[in-house]
């Protein structure tokens, strides 16, 4: 998995362009799953980190840290949850 910068996007509120963070993963096989995560932040310099990505037979989960606030995100066929981590 590689983290890079996507093409510059225009901000309508500040009229400035900043590269959008992009996570890129190359997969081989018959199927792939992609999750788009849109994260509101306090500003363009607030750090967002996704770790502990797991795919199971019943769904997927990951941990997200936004400016020091950590949460575990889980999704399965019929339910989902977002739970604060310590």
Image (cartoon, rainbow, N blue to C red):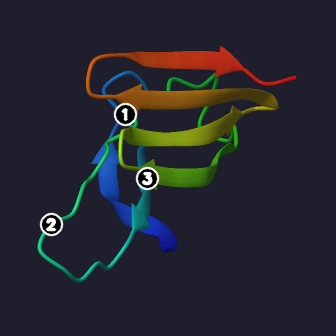
Rendering quarter of residue 80: top left
Q: Is residue 26 left or right of residue 51?
A: left
Tell me what residue is drawn at x 11 percent, y 74 percent: 30
* Residue at the right extreme, as displayed: 86
> In x, y percent, where is residue 61?
51, 40
Q: Secondary structure at mark 2?
A: loop
Residue 31 marker:
2
Quadrant of image for the C terminus = top right
Write down the residue under mark 3.
55
Rendering quarter of residue 13: top left
Q: Nearer the viewer, mark 1 or mark 3?
A: 3
Gap in angstroms between the C-alphas marked 1 and 3: 38 Å
Residue 15 marker:
1
Q: Secondary structure at mark 3?
A: strand
> In x, y percent, where is residue 54?
52, 52
Q: Is residue 64 left or right of residue 32?
A: right
Q: Is residue 60 left or right of residue 28?
A: right
Query: Would you place residue 10 above or below residue 8 in this image?
Result: above
């Amino acid at each position: 998995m590689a983290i890079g910068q996507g093409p510059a996007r225009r901000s309508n509120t500040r009229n400035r362009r900043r590269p959008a963070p992009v996570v890129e993963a190359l997969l081989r096989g018959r199927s792939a799953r992609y999750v788009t995560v849109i994260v509101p932040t306090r500003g363009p310099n607030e750090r967002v980190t996704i770790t502990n990505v797991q795919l199971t037979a019943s769904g997927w989960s990951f941990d997200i840290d936004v400016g020091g606030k950590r949460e575990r995100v889980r999704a399965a066929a019929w339910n989902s949850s977002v739970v604060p981590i310590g």
